[in-house]
Amino acid sequence: MRYLVVAHRTAKSPALAAKLREILEKDPEARFVLLVPARPPSGWVYDEGEVRRRAEEEARAAKEALKAQGIPIEEAKAGDISPLLALEEELAAHPGAYQAIVLSTLPPGLSRWLRLDVHTQAERFGLPVIHVMAPA
């Protein structure tokens, strides 16, 4: 199976790495693509290119951190500031390429994605959603 792993602030977390290792134990042929939605800065005005560049850097760094832990990340890429739009764009660009979504968030109270209900809204794409909650 090929999994779309969606994370930003938790992309290098031990909790995400543990879940991906668990998936690999059950499915040694599992493949992972890491999608890092851009993170909006505080305030209303920002340079979209700069935000995207930072997300690309985070994606590369997270890929290397996960690979160093023995997790085979095929590709790491940046996505839209909206995690749902980032998911939608990736799935539309590669129809049928993924069999499940692994969504990694911070815990309630800290997670913007949980406040946006991304973990349940992602189910609308018709794939199983595996939610990983990393500690703060």
Image (cartoon, grey):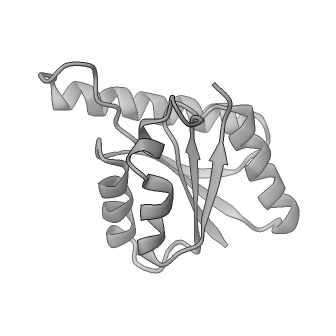
Q: Quadrant of the C terminus?
A: top right
Task: Place residue 102 in its image quadrant.
Answer: bottom right
Foreground of the two, 116 or 126: 116
Residue 82 located left or right of residue 120? left
Foreground of the two, 11 or 57: 11
Residue 94 located left or right of residue 81? right
Residue at 48% from the left image edge and 70% from the top image edge: 123
Residue at 40% from the left image edge and 78% from the top image edge: 95
Residue at 38% from the left image edge and 33% from the top image edge: 55
Q: Residue furthest left?
A: 45
Task: Place residue 69 in its image quadrant.
Answer: top right
Q: How many marks?
A: 0
Relative to 116, say whether 1 is above or below: below
Relative to 64, say whether 82 is above or below: below
Q: Residue furthest right?
A: 25
Q: Could you say where residue 98 lies in the image, as x and y percent from the top left? A: 53, 72
Residue 92 located left or right of residue 114? left
Q: Residue furthest front?
A: 109
